[in-house]
Amino acid sequence: MSWLGILLIGFAVTDLVHSARKVKLLPQMIGALSVLVLGMLADMTSGRDVVALLVIAVVVLAWGFAVTWGFGHPAQTAAWVPLALFGVALTAGVACSGLAPAADGPLDRWLGSMSLPAVDGLSADRFLLLLGAFGLQLSTGNVLVRLVLKSTGTINPGKDGAMPETKLKGGRLLGPLERVFILALAMGGQVTAASIVVAAKGLLRFPELSSRQEQATVHEMTEYFLLGSFMSWLVALGSYVLLV
């Protein structure tokens, strides 16, 4: 599972850096570098590991370029390129996860030296997968949601291909929060309790979606809300499936 965990971390780091600093080439370069650094810390130095790390680094670089191109191109279909890349990379990562040797090295020794109950007995492989899964809930989850919205034309892109401003301002913060809550509850064996998060989001959005002053766009906004929310929850629940 070490390869899959590092792949997810590479995606997460790339998107987090891009959300903080929209500098050309910087996010994907840092994401690819994080892949190589984590591989070295996990003592992944065999020939097979080195090849896998290089392939993962290239995929992370391609992800950064594909996302930028997908959002920058005015065509709806452009969003399918990064979505397809993500799907193929994730499928390949799961399929090849059994070939990855156990992570070891400084990372494993550091985990063993920690006295926190949460990491007691936690292997380096499991740690990498957990870190990648929870990291995916942050900026990458938002990127996937926006790509799906653009690819389906739920919200038409502007002239420059970017998603337009919306009156629903809290989505980019609320999305990561709800996904982290859902994944944490599921990992704690409280899958049913995640429905509280879902219901709370619906209550928060209801006044804006039912406003009589917005009837001209209420159907568009409702579709936007439903599709975006279900995709967001799918990212969290899909990550849970990878962890169980």
Image (tube, helix red, strand yellow):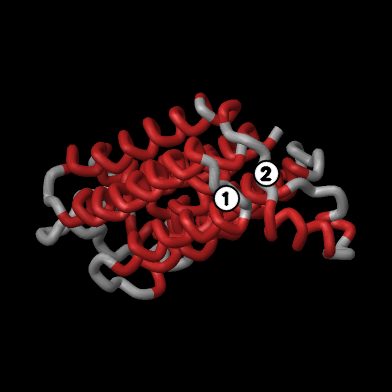
Q: Residues within 10 Å of mark 1 (few under 14, many from 20)?
A: many
Type of amino acid under label 2: Asp
Q: Which mark is residue 132?
A: 1
Q: Write down the residue under mark 2.
A: 125
Q: Give the percent coordinates (x, y) of residue 103.
A: 66, 45
Q: Which mark is residue 174?
A: none
Q: Give the percent coordinates (x, y) of residue 185.
A: 74, 47
Q: Secondary structure at mark 1?
A: helix
Tell me the residue at 25%/53% (across/down).
65
Q: Give the percent coordinates (x, y) of residue 206.
A: 52, 54
Q: Residues within 10 Å of mark 2 (few under 14, many from 20)?
A: many
Q: Is residue 92 above or below residue 134?
A: above
Disc with the residue nearer the chain's start (1 vs 2): 2
Give the total of numbered labels.
Answer: 2
Type of amino acid under label 1: Gly
State the residue in front, 173 or 47. 47
In the displayed structure image, the side of residue 229 where residue 217 appears, left or right: left
> In which image quadrant can residue 56 be found?
top left
Quadrant in the picture for the N terminus: top right
